[in-house]
Amino acid sequence: MILQERLKTIEVILGSKSPRRKELLSDMDIAFQVEVRETDESYDPNLSPIQIVQHIADAKLAAFPSDEFADKLVICADTIVLDEKGAVLGKPKDLNEAKEVIQGLSGKMHWVYTAVSCAYQNQFIRFVEETQVWLNNLTEAEIEYYVQKYQPLDKAGSYGIQEWIGRIGIGKIIGSYENVIGLPTARLQVELKKIFSI
């Protein structure tokens, strides 16, 4: 039996409103329902970036109490982007900030971390996946074209690797491509198989 067959027998909940995570989980041939709950995403600024992203993923999972969701597999995730100096790059507040962020990443390497927190029948899986991404030097015109034509305001780091900017601007990545989109699918498959002893 493969994981996908086993998951047909239980209800799977994706605790994320991200259309990219929804698409990636669908691409894994896993049937699921989306349920988003209000979550306090504040964190202690003294935490490391890996601790921050795991803390937020855990907070999202905590919004699904185990007594109510014990027999359902709940999957939650959070993604952060760090520039080459280790500064956390969140979602930009406007297009000008998006342009500034992309300009700062242009011609340099940055990190993307996605934390995943899952629960099923009081079993828990928690992990953080790291991907290194090198963005080629982009011209001001290319950056302007991207932020005007696409929607960078809902994306950590101000860009989506699966969009035009990724097609023309990514020079190299080390690690999971799907992780940069928002859900490390290969790692998730491995970790969920542990829960179900597959």
Image (cartoon, rainbow, N blue to C red):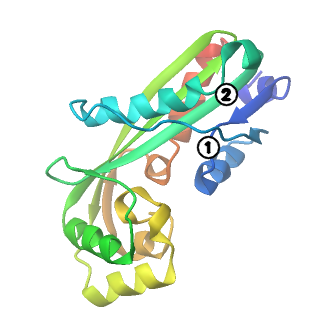
Q: Which numbered circle lies on residue 98?
A: none
Q: Which numbered circle lies on residue 16?
A: 1
Does residue 104 sit above or below 7 in this rendering?
below
Measure the C-alpha gap from mark 2 to mark 1: 10 Å
Picture coordinates of residue 100 (x, y %)? 25, 73
- Number of marks present in the image shown: 2
Observer able to see residue 128: no
User: Seen in the image, is 53 located left or right of residue 57?
Assistant: left
Q: Nearer the viewer, residue 95 or 195?
A: 95
Indicate the secondary structure of the residue bearing disc 1.
loop
Going by the numbered disc 2, the residue's amino acid type is Val
Which residue lies under the disc numbered 2?
74
User: Seen in the image, is 178 located left or right of residue 122?
Assistant: left
Residue sitting at x 78%, y 26%: 7
Picture coordinates of residue 59 (x, y %)? 50, 29
Mark nearer the N terminus (2 vs 1): 1
